[in-house]
Amino acid sequence: MGEEHAMTTTRLNTAESIGERRKFLLGAGLAFALAALTPGSLAAQDFPNKPVRLLVGFAAGGPSDLLARIVAQKLSDHWKQPVVVENRVGAAGTVAAAVVARAAPDGYTLAFAGSTTFIGYELLNPSKVPYKTLEAFEPVCLVADQTMVMSTRTDLGVKTVQEFVAMAKSKPGAMNFGMSGFGSPPHLNMELFKQGAGIDLLTVPFAGSAPSAQALLSGTIDAMMDGPQGSINIAKDGKTRIIAVADDKRLAELPDVPTFKELGYDAQVKSWYALLAPKGTPRAVIDKIDADARQVLGDEAVLEMITRSGFKRNLLDSKDFGTMLREQTAKVAALIKSANIKAE
């Protein structure tokens, strides 16, 4: 009898112990699950549940606007919510960027802009820009980029970079180059080239690539930097010649044109466009926009549209784009300081 009672008591104690352990494990699991459901992750699960604004700092019809509208349409289709492009023109795109920097950090206001807006113009005009990119924005993803190429007018009489450098050294300060805006990739690449080659060229700014190209064709300037598509088009009549590619690899469309890297010059600043969000946007929301954008922009139809706009698709995720942004900012800041470049 005593033995049976002891066994019964043991079973009851064991059952109670198992029950307590189950309660503990269930409670711990529930606590873990609730902890994982942060406000950011909850917001991402429901994102987006209303229209998203996409701010562009340049006029409708330009390269950045065309790319932004491709992104907006594809995300609208995917999210079943409108992604509305808003053009806020001014100050190399920084007017639009400032709107995003001040917006609520919830993912519903995004910037679509490029290297001139977020690096060159800001570093050359710190007093005119009401934010610091690396402190005011979260990188979402890179969408596309464009390699610059250097062209000269044919009647200048040079066929290679080496010949151009020799001519420039023979008459310091007498030759010039045109570029579309201080702090733009064409400007920065030419400054890097000048610094590496040890030559003195007069900088001639223009309000865009078209007037710069026209000046080259008319003989007003000696050289310029621009994207390959436009440069190839104006070279067809034989009045201009492409002599270098500002990249570390030759372009498929210009297989016989050497890169600056091959020639020993560190001039490889690309023009790029990307999505950025206000600082403080929940990581889960950033990750969702990043993943969705790269997914919808990954098909062949989008590749064709981006290529037609003169760019190359380059879908870098938030982490890799953030690394690229920091590295380029440091490189351009060092160039501006060492070459004493001013926004004139």
Image (cartoon, grey):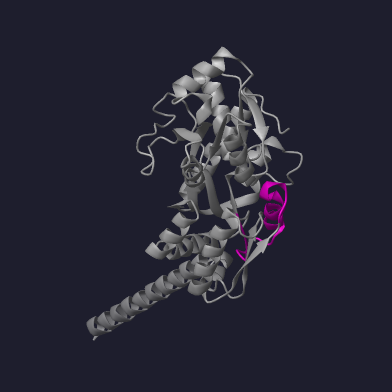
Q: Is residue 201 left or right of residue 160?
A: right
| Residue 96 among magenta residues | yes
As drawn, is 17 to the left or to the right of 105?
left
Q: Residue at x 47, y 67 (%)?
A: 32
User: Looking at the figure, which quarter contains the C terminus?
Assistant: top right
Q: Nearer the viewer, residue 257 or 314?
A: 257
The residue at the far top in this view is 170
Residue 198 visible in the shown view: no
- The reply, left or right, for residue 180 in relation to residue 249 is right
- The residue under the point 55% across, 15% down is 169
Q: Residue at x 70, y 30 (%)?
A: 342
**Compared with residue 128, is residue 340 higher up or lower down, i.e. above or below?**
above
Image quadrant where residue 259 sits: top left
Between 232 and 7, the one lying in front of the other is 232
Q: Which residues are magenta?
A: 89-112
- Residue 53 lies in the magenta stretch: no
Residue 71 percent location from the top left of the image: 52, 63
Q: Position of residue 245 (x, y in %)?
A: 44, 35
